[in-house]
């Protein structure tokens, strides 16, 4: 199994999403005989944002090929200004490539990246879950679900720690709960997963 581990938080050692993504990778590695892990830190080694010239040659890029060669993708994502870090968005722009991860069919787009599993460790400073009055401001989980569904990925799971900016007590409790969820990630995902909490 090939696993691609991506971190995108700019917070370094203070990043909750990095702690969670590492725990998810550890869980996957310990529950499978052979896992080839490739790690990329998109914050310390960011991809360039798209230019016209780069857009015209995406199909020959290493990033989309690396994604296509991967069985499981684990993403650590911070939550900045209601969405994902720009470093993660740049990576997305390099893997959503016509003719590689999606095609145009008679009735609309067709995802070409079926059979992959995506697990996202998402850290949010405020609370944006269903019961929150700020739910409509949440554009990270919704963006990632939309992108991966568009390219054919049906197994998308989220481990979410939120309310991290409210107090140190809330931060510790939220991270602890998310770590517990990360350590219980099923070894395999045979059906689309439900949203995390």
Image (tube, rainbow, N blue to C red):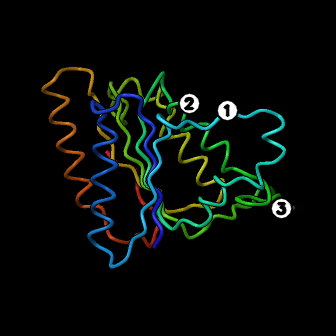
Q: Is residue 191 left or right of residue 148?
A: left
Density class for disc 1 (Cα within 10 Å; few <14, some 14-19, many ≥20) is some
Whether pointer 2 and pointer 3 mark residues with C-beta atoms closer than 8 Å, the reply is no
From the viewer's perspective, is 22 left or right of 179? right
Q: CA distance from mark 2 to mark 3?
A: 30 Å
- Which residue ends up furthest to the front in the rendered image? 45
Q: Considering the image in quadrants, where does the N terminus appear? A: bottom left
User: Is 35 placed above or below 73 here?
Assistant: below
The structure residue drawn at horizontal position 35% and vertical position 28%, both measured from the top left corner, is: 11
The front one of 182 and 41 is 41
Counting from the top left corner in percent of width and height, residue 38 is at 46, 58
Mark 1 in CB contact with mark 2 (< 8 angstroms): yes
Spatial CA span between label 1 and label 2: 9 Å
Q: Which residue is mark 2?
A: 86
Do the residues under discs 1 and 3 have CB atoms within 8 angstroms?
no
Residue at image position (37%, 45%) is: 121
Judging from the image, what secondary structure is the residue with disc 2 in?
helix
Q: Of callouts 2 and 3, which one flags the residue occurring earlier in the amino acid sequence?
A: 2
User: Of the residues tagged 1 and 2, which is closer to the observer?
Assistant: 1
- Tell me where residue 160 appears, x and y as whole percent: 33, 42
In the rendered image, which quarter contains the C terminus? top left
* Residue 132 point in image, percent of width and height: 34, 28
Residue corresponding to mark 1? 49
SS for callout 3? strand
The residue under label 3 is: 105
Disc on the earlier residue, 1 or 3? 1
* 187, 15: nearer the viewer: 15
The Cα atoms of the two marked residues, 1 and 3, are separated by 28 Å
- Mark 1 element type: loop
Q: Nearer the viewer, residue 43 or 23?
A: 43
């Amino acid at each position: 199994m090939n696993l691609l581990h991506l971190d995108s938080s700019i917070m370094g050692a203070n990043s909750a999403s990095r702690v969670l993504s590492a725990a998810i990778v550890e869980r996957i590695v310990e529950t499978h005989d052979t896992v080839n892990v490739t790690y990329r830190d998109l914050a310390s080694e960011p991809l360039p944002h798209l230019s016209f010239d780069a857009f015209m040659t995406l199909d020959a890029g290493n990033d989309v090929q690396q994604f296509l060669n991967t069985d499981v993708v684990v993403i650590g994502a911070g939550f900045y200004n209601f969405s994902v870090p720009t470093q993660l968005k740049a990576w997305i722009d390099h893997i959503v490539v016509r003719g590689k991860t999606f095609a145009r069919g008679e009735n609309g787009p067709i995802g070409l990246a079926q059979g992959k599993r995506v697990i996202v460790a998402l850290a949010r400073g405020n609370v944006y879950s269903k019961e929150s009055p700020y739910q409509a401001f949440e554009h990270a989980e919704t963006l990632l679900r939309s992108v991966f569904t568009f390219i054919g990925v049906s197994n998308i799971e989220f481990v979410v720690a939120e309310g991290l900016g409210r107090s140190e007590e809330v931060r510790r409790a939220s991270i602890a709960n998310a770590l517990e969820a990360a350590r219980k990630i099923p070894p395999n995902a045979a059906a689309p997963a439900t949203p995390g909490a």
